[in-house]
Image (tube, rainbow, N blue to C red):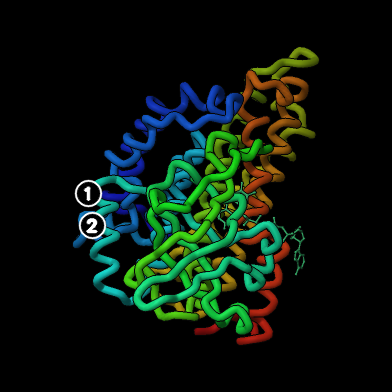
Amino acid sequence: MRELSNDQKMMLATVRKFMRKEVAPYSQEMDETQSFRKELKQKFGDLGLFSAIVPTEFGGLGYNLTSFCLLIEEISKVDASMGVVIQDNGTGLRPILLCDDARLKKEVFSMVATKGSSIGFAITEPHAGSDTASISTRAVRESNRYTLNGRKTFITNAGISDYYIVFALTDPPARHRGMSAFFVDACSPGLGIGKKENKLGLRASPTADVILEDVVVPEKYRIGGENSAFLLLMKTLDATRPTIGSQALGIAESALEYAIKYAGERHQFGRPIMEFQGLQFLIADMITEVEASRAILYRATELYDEGFENVTPYSAMSKLFCTDVAMRVTTDAVQVLGGYGCMKDHPVERMMRDAKVTQIYEGTNQIQRLVITRSVKRSGYPFQP
Ligand SMILES: Cc1cc2nc3c(=O)[nH]c(=O)nc-3n(C[C@H](O)[C@H](O)[C@H](O)COP(=O)(O)OP(=O)(O)OC[C@H]3O[C@@H](n4cnc5c(N)ncnc54)[C@H](O)[C@@H]3O)c2cc1C
Protein backbone atom coordinates (compact mmCIF):
# COMPACT_ATOMS: atom_id res chain seq x y z
CA MET A 1 0.00 0.00 0.00
CA ARG A 2 1.14 3.51 -0.75
CA GLU A 3 2.14 5.83 2.09
CA LEU A 4 -0.83 7.45 3.78
CA SER A 5 -1.56 11.05 2.90
CA ASN A 6 -1.56 13.71 5.62
CA ASP A 7 -5.35 13.90 5.41
CA GLN A 8 -5.64 10.15 5.95
CA LYS A 9 -3.23 10.30 8.92
CA MET A 10 -5.23 13.13 10.49
CA MET A 11 -8.52 11.32 9.95
CA LEU A 12 -7.16 8.16 11.57
CA ALA A 13 -5.77 10.08 14.55
CA THR A 14 -9.15 11.79 15.13
CA VAL A 15 -11.11 8.56 14.87
CA ARG A 16 -8.64 6.68 17.09
CA LYS A 17 -8.96 9.32 19.79
CA PHE A 18 -12.75 9.34 19.53
CA MET A 19 -13.05 5.55 19.65
CA ARG A 20 -10.76 5.22 22.67
CA LYS A 21 -12.55 7.96 24.61
CA GLU A 22 -16.19 7.59 23.59
CA VAL A 23 -16.59 3.92 22.66
CA ALA A 24 -13.93 1.69 24.24
CA PRO A 25 -15.19 2.20 27.83
CA TYR A 26 -18.63 0.88 26.81
CA SER A 27 -17.71 -1.87 24.33
CA GLN A 28 -17.90 -4.79 26.73
CA GLU A 29 -21.15 -3.58 28.25
CA MET A 30 -22.73 -2.97 24.83
CA ASP A 31 -21.67 -6.47 23.79
CA GLU A 32 -23.05 -8.12 26.93
CA THR A 33 -26.32 -6.21 26.96
CA GLN A 34 -26.57 -6.28 23.17
CA SER A 35 -27.32 -2.60 23.10
CA PHE A 36 -26.28 0.26 20.86
CA ARG A 37 -25.83 3.53 22.77
CA LYS A 38 -28.15 5.85 20.90
CA GLU A 39 -26.02 8.94 21.67
CA LEU A 40 -23.24 7.37 19.60
CA LYS A 41 -25.35 7.81 16.48
CA GLN A 42 -25.41 11.55 17.07
CA LYS A 43 -21.66 11.59 17.74
CA PHE A 44 -20.86 9.54 14.62
CA GLY A 45 -23.06 11.97 12.66
CA ASP A 46 -21.28 14.99 14.16
CA LEU A 47 -17.92 13.52 13.11
CA GLY A 48 -19.27 13.16 9.57
CA LEU A 49 -18.85 9.39 9.60
CA PHE A 50 -22.27 8.73 8.04
CA SER A 51 -21.30 10.90 5.10
CA ALA A 52 -17.75 9.59 4.76
CA ILE A 53 -18.22 8.51 1.13
CA VAL A 54 -20.58 11.36 0.20
CA PRO A 55 -18.82 13.62 -2.33
CA THR A 56 -17.47 16.88 -0.89
CA GLU A 57 -19.66 18.93 -3.27
CA PHE A 58 -22.65 17.78 -1.17
CA GLY A 59 -20.94 18.42 2.16
CA GLY A 60 -19.58 14.90 2.72
CA LEU A 61 -16.01 13.81 3.47
CA GLY A 62 -15.56 12.51 -0.08
CA TYR A 63 -13.57 9.41 0.90
CA ASN A 64 -12.54 7.02 -1.81
CA LEU A 65 -12.69 3.30 -1.03
CA THR A 66 -9.16 3.16 0.37
CA SER A 67 -9.83 5.96 2.86
CA PHE A 68 -13.19 4.48 3.81
CA CYS A 69 -11.58 1.10 4.49
CA LEU A 70 -8.86 2.75 6.60
CA LEU A 71 -11.66 4.37 8.60
CA ILE A 72 -13.57 1.10 9.12
CA GLU A 73 -10.33 -0.69 10.04
CA GLU A 74 -9.53 1.93 12.69
CA ILE A 75 -13.04 1.83 14.19
CA SER A 76 -13.09 -1.98 14.19
CA LYS A 77 -9.80 -2.17 16.07
CA VAL A 78 -11.69 -0.82 19.05
CA ASP A 79 -15.20 -2.09 18.41
CA ALA A 80 -16.19 -4.14 15.36
CA SER A 81 -19.90 -3.63 16.08
CA MET A 82 -19.41 0.10 15.59
CA GLY A 83 -17.34 -0.76 12.52
CA VAL A 84 -20.39 -2.37 10.92
CA VAL A 85 -22.67 0.48 11.98
CA ILE A 86 -20.56 2.81 9.82
CA GLN A 87 -19.70 0.21 7.15
CA ASP A 88 -23.35 -0.68 6.57
CA ASN A 89 -24.25 2.97 6.11
CA GLY A 90 -21.60 3.07 3.38
CA THR A 91 -23.28 0.04 1.77
CA GLY A 92 -26.58 1.95 1.87
CA LEU A 93 -25.03 5.00 0.21
CA ARG A 94 -23.14 3.10 -2.47
CA PRO A 95 -26.06 2.40 -4.88
CA ILE A 96 -26.90 6.11 -4.84
CA LEU A 97 -23.26 6.94 -5.51
CA LEU A 98 -23.19 4.47 -8.39
CA CYS A 99 -26.46 5.47 -10.06
CA ASP A 100 -26.59 8.35 -12.52
CA ASP A 101 -29.62 10.14 -11.08
CA ALA A 102 -28.25 13.62 -10.29
CA ARG A 103 -31.47 14.76 -8.60
CA LEU A 104 -31.60 11.74 -6.25
CA LYS A 105 -27.90 12.13 -5.41
CA LYS A 106 -28.38 15.77 -4.52
CA GLU A 107 -31.40 15.10 -2.32
CA VAL A 108 -30.00 12.07 -0.46
CA PHE A 109 -26.41 13.22 -0.08
CA SER A 110 -27.32 16.72 1.10
CA MET A 111 -29.65 15.23 3.69
CA VAL A 112 -27.09 12.71 4.93
CA ALA A 113 -24.38 15.36 5.13
CA THR A 114 -26.46 18.02 6.86
CA LYS A 115 -28.62 15.90 9.18
CA GLY A 116 -26.24 12.99 9.82
CA SER A 117 -28.96 10.58 8.63
CA SER A 118 -28.06 6.91 8.22
CA ILE A 119 -29.09 4.34 5.62
CA GLY A 120 -29.60 0.58 5.96
CA PHE A 121 -29.34 -1.92 3.13
CA ALA A 122 -32.02 -4.58 2.69
CA ILE A 123 -31.74 -7.42 0.21
CA THR A 124 -31.77 -10.66 2.28
CA GLU A 125 -35.09 -12.42 2.92
CA PRO A 126 -35.96 -15.48 5.01
CA HIS A 127 -35.74 -17.74 1.91
CA ALA A 128 -33.25 -15.71 -0.12
CA GLY A 129 -29.78 -15.39 1.42
CA SER A 130 -26.85 -16.37 -0.81
CA ASP A 131 -29.31 -16.71 -3.68
CA THR A 132 -30.23 -13.03 -3.83
CA ALA A 133 -31.91 -13.57 -7.22
CA SER A 134 -34.70 -15.49 -5.48
CA ILE A 135 -36.11 -12.59 -3.43
CA SER A 136 -39.90 -12.31 -3.39
CA THR A 137 -40.52 -8.77 -2.07
CA ARG A 138 -42.79 -7.08 -4.59
CA ALA A 139 -42.98 -3.51 -5.82
CA VAL A 140 -46.14 -2.84 -7.80
CA ARG A 141 -46.26 0.30 -9.87
CA GLU A 142 -49.32 2.50 -10.09
CA SER A 143 -48.83 5.74 -12.05
CA ASN A 144 -45.85 7.52 -10.43
CA ARG A 145 -45.49 5.44 -7.28
CA TYR A 146 -44.78 1.89 -6.14
CA THR A 147 -46.34 -0.19 -3.37
CA LEU A 148 -43.87 -2.47 -1.62
CA ASN A 149 -44.75 -5.69 0.23
CA GLY A 150 -42.35 -8.23 1.70
CA ARG A 151 -40.00 -9.08 4.55
CA LYS A 152 -36.27 -8.39 4.69
CA THR A 153 -34.29 -10.35 7.24
CA PHE A 154 -31.04 -9.94 9.23
CA ILE A 155 -30.89 -6.23 8.38
CA THR A 156 -28.00 -4.39 10.02
CA ASN A 157 -28.92 -1.10 11.69
CA ALA A 158 -32.63 -1.97 11.47
CA GLY A 159 -34.42 0.33 13.86
CA ILE A 160 -31.64 2.93 14.00
CA SER A 161 -31.50 3.76 10.29
CA ASP A 162 -33.41 6.75 8.95
CA TYR A 163 -33.73 5.22 5.48
CA TYR A 164 -33.37 1.82 3.83
CA ILE A 165 -32.30 0.74 0.37
CA VAL A 166 -34.84 -1.97 -0.44
CA PHE A 167 -34.53 -4.42 -3.32
CA ALA A 168 -37.83 -5.69 -4.73
CA LEU A 169 -39.21 -7.39 -7.83
CA THR A 170 -40.96 -5.17 -10.33
CA ASP A 171 -41.18 -8.02 -12.87
CA PRO A 172 -41.31 -11.29 -10.90
CA PRO A 173 -41.20 -13.79 -13.82
CA ALA A 174 -37.91 -12.21 -14.92
CA ARG A 175 -36.42 -12.96 -11.45
CA HIS A 176 -33.15 -11.02 -11.00
CA ARG A 177 -33.70 -9.26 -14.32
CA GLY A 178 -36.92 -7.90 -12.88
CA MET A 179 -35.40 -6.40 -9.73
CA SER A 180 -35.50 -2.71 -8.78
CA ALA A 181 -34.02 -0.78 -5.84
CA PHE A 182 -35.77 1.89 -3.78
CA PHE A 183 -34.78 4.56 -1.29
CA VAL A 184 -37.35 4.16 1.49
CA ASP A 185 -38.00 6.44 4.45
CA ALA A 186 -37.94 4.47 7.72
CA CYS A 187 -40.99 6.47 8.87
CA SER A 188 -43.10 5.37 5.90
CA PRO A 189 -46.52 4.05 6.96
CA GLY A 190 -46.46 0.24 6.74
CA LEU A 191 -42.72 -0.10 7.41
CA GLY A 192 -42.12 -2.10 10.59
CA ILE A 193 -39.09 -3.51 12.40
CA GLY A 194 -39.12 -7.12 13.64
CA LYS A 195 -37.67 -8.41 16.87
CA LYS A 196 -34.01 -7.68 17.46
CA GLU A 197 -31.87 -10.76 16.76
CA ASN A 198 -29.86 -12.23 19.65
CA LYS A 199 -26.50 -12.72 17.98
CA LEU A 200 -23.21 -14.59 18.45
CA GLY A 201 -21.07 -11.60 17.54
CA LEU A 202 -21.25 -7.91 16.61
CA ARG A 203 -23.87 -7.82 19.32
CA ALA A 204 -23.86 -4.05 19.80
CA SER A 205 -24.95 -3.54 16.20
CA PRO A 206 -28.71 -4.01 15.90
CA THR A 207 -29.94 -6.67 13.46
CA ALA A 208 -33.63 -7.23 12.75
CA ASP A 209 -36.22 -7.82 10.04
CA VAL A 210 -37.59 -4.90 8.05
CA ILE A 211 -41.23 -5.60 7.26
CA LEU A 212 -42.97 -3.85 4.37
CA GLU A 213 -46.75 -3.82 4.29
CA ASP A 214 -48.20 -1.65 1.53
CA VAL A 215 -45.33 0.82 1.81
CA VAL A 216 -45.79 3.52 -0.82
CA VAL A 217 -42.63 4.85 -2.46
CA PRO A 218 -42.69 7.69 -5.03
CA GLU A 219 -41.16 6.77 -8.39
CA LYS A 220 -38.49 9.44 -7.93
CA TYR A 221 -37.01 7.25 -5.15
CA ARG A 222 -36.36 4.32 -7.45
CA ILE A 223 -32.59 4.02 -7.78
CA GLY A 224 -31.63 3.68 -11.44
CA GLY A 225 -33.87 2.20 -14.11
CA GLU A 226 -36.75 -0.16 -13.47
CA ASN A 227 -35.61 -3.83 -13.49
CA SER A 228 -31.95 -2.81 -13.45
CA ALA A 229 -31.11 -3.31 -9.78
CA PHE A 230 -29.32 -6.66 -9.95
CA LEU A 231 -26.40 -5.15 -11.83
CA LEU A 232 -26.44 -2.24 -9.38
CA LEU A 233 -26.30 -4.76 -6.51
CA MET A 234 -23.28 -6.52 -8.05
CA LYS A 235 -21.49 -3.20 -8.55
CA THR A 236 -22.33 -2.22 -4.99
CA LEU A 237 -20.84 -5.45 -3.66
CA ASP A 238 -17.60 -4.82 -5.56
CA ALA A 239 -17.15 -1.74 -3.39
CA THR A 240 -18.59 -3.04 -0.13
CA ARG A 241 -16.89 -6.43 0.20
CA PRO A 242 -13.48 -4.84 0.85
CA THR A 243 -15.10 -2.80 3.62
CA ILE A 244 -15.91 -6.07 5.40
CA GLY A 245 -12.29 -7.06 4.77
CA SER A 246 -11.20 -3.88 6.52
CA GLN A 247 -13.49 -4.59 9.46
CA ALA A 248 -11.93 -8.06 9.73
CA LEU A 249 -8.41 -6.63 9.45
CA GLY A 250 -9.14 -4.24 12.32
CA ILE A 251 -10.39 -7.11 14.49
CA ALA A 252 -7.36 -9.30 13.67
CA GLU A 253 -4.84 -6.52 14.33
CA SER A 254 -6.35 -5.78 17.68
CA ALA A 255 -6.44 -9.43 18.76
CA LEU A 256 -2.84 -9.85 17.63
CA GLU A 257 -1.60 -6.80 19.55
CA TYR A 258 -3.43 -7.99 22.65
CA ALA A 259 -1.95 -11.50 22.36
CA ILE A 260 1.61 -10.20 21.91
CA LYS A 261 1.32 -7.97 24.97
CA TYR A 262 -0.15 -10.78 27.04
CA ALA A 263 2.54 -13.26 25.95
CA GLY A 264 5.21 -10.81 27.10
CA GLU A 265 3.64 -10.42 30.54
CA ARG A 266 2.33 -13.89 31.39
CA HIS A 267 4.88 -16.14 33.11
CA GLN A 268 4.83 -19.94 33.20
CA PHE A 269 7.73 -22.28 34.01
CA GLY A 270 9.61 -19.24 35.34
CA ARG A 271 9.62 -17.15 32.15
CA PRO A 272 7.35 -15.15 29.85
CA ILE A 273 5.33 -17.52 27.66
CA MET A 274 6.57 -15.47 24.65
CA GLU A 275 9.94 -17.21 25.14
CA PHE A 276 8.49 -20.61 24.22
CA GLN A 277 9.10 -21.47 20.61
CA GLY A 278 5.65 -23.05 20.28
CA LEU A 279 4.03 -19.66 20.92
CA GLN A 280 6.64 -17.74 18.92
CA PHE A 281 5.73 -19.75 15.81
CA LEU A 282 2.02 -19.20 16.42
CA ILE A 283 2.51 -15.45 16.79
CA ALA A 284 4.81 -15.28 13.76
CA ASP A 285 2.06 -16.89 11.68
CA MET A 286 -0.51 -14.46 13.06
CA ILE A 287 1.66 -11.46 12.16
CA THR A 288 2.31 -12.82 8.68
CA GLU A 289 -1.38 -13.37 8.00
CA VAL A 290 -2.36 -9.93 9.26
CA GLU A 291 0.24 -8.26 7.04
CA ALA A 292 -0.86 -10.37 4.05
CA SER A 293 -4.46 -9.28 4.72
CA ARG A 294 -3.43 -5.65 4.68
CA ALA A 295 -1.63 -6.16 1.37
CA ILE A 296 -4.52 -7.91 -0.40
CA LEU A 297 -7.14 -5.53 1.00
CA TYR A 298 -5.46 -2.29 -0.01
CA ARG A 299 -4.44 -3.73 -3.38
CA ALA A 300 -8.18 -4.30 -4.02
CA THR A 301 -9.19 -0.82 -2.83
CA GLU A 302 -6.49 0.87 -4.87
CA LEU A 303 -7.56 -1.04 -7.99
CA TYR A 304 -11.13 0.05 -7.29
CA ASP A 305 -10.13 3.68 -6.78
CA GLU A 306 -8.07 3.61 -9.98
CA GLY A 307 -11.16 2.42 -11.89
CA PHE A 308 -9.77 -1.04 -12.74
CA GLU A 309 -12.63 -2.66 -14.62
CA ASN A 310 -12.21 -6.27 -13.54
CA VAL A 311 -12.16 -5.50 -9.82
CA THR A 312 -14.78 -8.11 -8.83
CA PRO A 313 -12.38 -10.99 -8.07
CA TYR A 314 -10.04 -8.69 -6.10
CA SER A 315 -12.94 -7.41 -4.08
CA ALA A 316 -14.08 -10.97 -3.35
CA MET A 317 -10.52 -12.09 -2.49
CA SER A 318 -10.07 -9.22 -0.05
CA LYS A 319 -13.28 -10.12 1.79
CA LEU A 320 -12.52 -13.85 1.75
CA PHE A 321 -8.90 -13.62 2.83
CA CYS A 322 -9.19 -10.94 5.50
CA THR A 323 -12.21 -12.54 7.17
CA ASP A 324 -10.73 -16.05 7.17
CA VAL A 325 -7.54 -14.60 8.64
CA ALA A 326 -9.52 -12.71 11.28
CA MET A 327 -11.18 -15.97 12.32
CA ARG A 328 -7.85 -17.81 12.58
CA VAL A 329 -5.98 -14.96 14.28
CA THR A 330 -8.68 -14.30 16.88
CA THR A 331 -8.95 -18.04 17.63
CA ASP A 332 -5.17 -18.19 18.05
CA ALA A 333 -5.25 -15.08 20.24
CA VAL A 334 -7.66 -16.88 22.58
CA GLN A 335 -5.21 -19.81 22.54
CA VAL A 336 -2.30 -17.54 23.50
CA LEU A 337 -4.27 -16.35 26.53
CA GLY A 338 -5.15 -19.92 27.55
CA GLY A 339 -8.05 -20.10 30.02
CA TYR A 340 -8.06 -16.33 30.40
CA GLY A 341 -8.80 -16.05 26.68
CA CYS A 342 -12.17 -17.69 27.31
CA MET A 343 -13.11 -15.10 29.92
CA LYS A 344 -14.96 -11.86 29.25
CA ASP A 345 -12.30 -9.94 31.22
CA HIS A 346 -10.27 -10.02 28.01
CA PRO A 347 -11.61 -8.70 24.68
CA VAL A 348 -10.22 -11.53 22.52
CA GLU A 349 -13.26 -13.76 23.11
CA ARG A 350 -15.51 -10.94 21.80
CA MET A 351 -13.18 -10.45 18.84
CA MET A 352 -13.39 -14.16 18.01
CA ARG A 353 -17.20 -14.01 18.03
CA ASP A 354 -17.18 -10.81 15.97
CA ALA A 355 -14.79 -12.33 13.42
CA LYS A 356 -17.15 -15.24 12.77
CA VAL A 357 -19.88 -12.95 11.44
CA THR A 358 -17.50 -11.37 8.92
CA GLN A 359 -17.12 -14.75 7.19
CA ILE A 360 -20.87 -14.84 6.64
CA TYR A 361 -22.39 -11.51 5.70
CA GLU A 362 -21.95 -9.46 2.51
CA GLY A 363 -21.85 -12.90 0.83
CA THR A 364 -20.50 -15.95 2.66
CA ASN A 365 -16.93 -16.98 1.99
CA GLN A 366 -18.17 -19.92 -0.09
CA ILE A 367 -19.91 -17.37 -2.33
CA GLN A 368 -16.69 -15.30 -2.56
CA ARG A 369 -14.89 -18.41 -3.82
CA LEU A 370 -17.61 -18.87 -6.47
CA VAL A 371 -17.23 -15.23 -7.51
CA ILE A 372 -13.44 -15.63 -7.90
CA THR A 373 -13.63 -18.76 -10.02
CA ARG A 374 -16.49 -17.36 -12.11
CA SER A 375 -14.20 -14.43 -12.88
CA VAL A 376 -11.61 -16.88 -14.18
CA LYS A 377 -14.24 -18.49 -16.42
CA ARG A 378 -15.31 -15.08 -17.66
CA SER A 379 -12.02 -13.34 -18.26
CA GLY A 380 -9.27 -15.90 -17.61
CA TYR A 381 -6.36 -15.52 -15.23
CA PRO A 382 -4.38 -13.28 -14.62
CA PHE A 383 -7.29 -10.87 -14.28
CA GLN A 384 -6.89 -8.23 -16.94
CA PRO A 385 -8.97 -5.11 -17.53
C1 LIG B 1 -25.14 -10.15 11.57
C2 LIG B 1 -25.66 -10.15 10.18
C3 LIG B 1 -25.97 -8.96 9.56
C4 LIG B 1 -26.50 -8.94 8.27
N1 LIG B 1 -26.83 -7.74 7.70
C5 LIG B 1 -27.47 -7.73 6.51
C6 LIG B 1 -27.94 -6.50 5.95
O1 LIG B 1 -27.74 -5.42 6.50
N2 LIG B 1 -28.62 -6.54 4.78
C7 LIG B 1 -28.87 -7.71 4.11
O2 LIG B 1 -29.51 -7.67 3.06
N3 LIG B 1 -28.42 -8.90 4.62
C8 LIG B 1 -27.74 -8.94 5.80
N4 LIG B 1 -27.29 -10.12 6.32
C9 LIG B 1 -27.58 -11.35 5.61
C10 LIG B 1 -26.34 -12.04 5.04
O3 LIG B 1 -25.86 -11.35 3.92
C11 LIG B 1 -26.74 -13.50 4.74
O4 LIG B 1 -26.91 -14.13 5.99
C12 LIG B 1 -25.71 -14.23 3.91
O5 LIG B 1 -25.65 -13.71 2.60
C13 LIG B 1 -25.99 -15.73 3.84
O6 LIG B 1 -27.32 -16.01 3.58
P1 LIG B 1 -28.09 -17.07 4.51
O7 LIG B 1 -27.86 -16.66 5.92
O8 LIG B 1 -29.48 -17.17 4.04
O9 LIG B 1 -27.34 -18.44 4.29
P2 LIG B 1 -27.59 -19.48 3.10
O10 LIG B 1 -27.57 -18.78 1.80
O11 LIG B 1 -28.77 -20.32 3.43
O12 LIG B 1 -26.28 -20.36 3.20
C14 LIG B 1 -26.13 -21.41 4.15
C15 LIG B 1 -24.79 -22.10 3.86
O13 LIG B 1 -24.80 -22.65 2.53
C16 LIG B 1 -23.69 -22.15 1.80
N5 LIG B 1 -24.06 -21.98 0.40
C17 LIG B 1 -25.19 -21.40 -0.10
N6 LIG B 1 -25.15 -21.40 -1.44
C18 LIG B 1 -23.98 -21.98 -1.80
C19 LIG B 1 -23.36 -22.29 -3.04
N7 LIG B 1 -23.91 -21.98 -4.22
N8 LIG B 1 -22.15 -22.91 -3.03
C20 LIG B 1 -21.55 -23.24 -1.86
N9 LIG B 1 -22.09 -22.97 -0.64
C21 LIG B 1 -23.29 -22.35 -0.61
C22 LIG B 1 -23.35 -20.81 2.45
O14 LIG B 1 -22.01 -20.42 2.19
C23 LIG B 1 -23.61 -21.13 3.91
O15 LIG B 1 -22.49 -21.77 4.45
C24 LIG B 1 -26.72 -10.16 7.59
C25 LIG B 1 -26.38 -11.36 8.21
C26 LIG B 1 -25.85 -11.37 9.48
C27 LIG B 1 -25.50 -12.69 10.12
Q: Work out whether residue 249 or residue 146 is closer to the camera in this orientation and state it.
A: 146
In the picture, measured across the screen, residue 128 lies left or right of residue 121, that is right
- Given the current orientation, which residue lies at the most extreme top position? 270
| Element on which disc 2 rests | helix
The quadrant where residue 319 appears: bottom right
Give the left or right position of residue 222, taking residue 7 as reference.
Answer: right
The circle drawn on residue 34 is: none
Badge 2 is on which residue?
Answer: 110
In this rendering, position of residue 357 left or right of residue 299: right
- The percent coordinates of residue 10 (x first, y second) are 28, 43
Screen quadrant of the N terminus:
bottom left
Q: Are marks 1 and 2 in contact (CB under 8 Å)?
A: yes
> What crowding class fits label 2: few (fewer than 14 Cα within 10 Å), some (14-19), or many (20 or more)?
many
Instruction: Please say whether residue 298 is visible from this viewpoint.
Output: yes
Within 8 Å of ligand 1, the CB of disc 1?
no
Task: Between residue 29 and residue 227, name the one nearer to us.
Answer: 227
User: Can residue 300 be seen here?
Assistant: no
Residue 245 occupies which quadrant of the picture? bottom right
Relative to residue 107, is residue 310 depicted above or below? Answer: below
- Residue type (three-letter) at the residue carrying disc 2: Ser
Residue 6 on image: x %, y %: 27, 49
Residue denoted by label 1: 114
Residue drawn at (68%, 42%) of the image: 329
Which residue is pictured at 46% across the width and 21% down the height? 25
Separation of marks 1 and 2 at Cα, in angstroms:
6 Å
Which residue is depicted at the point 25% across and 46% down?
A: 115
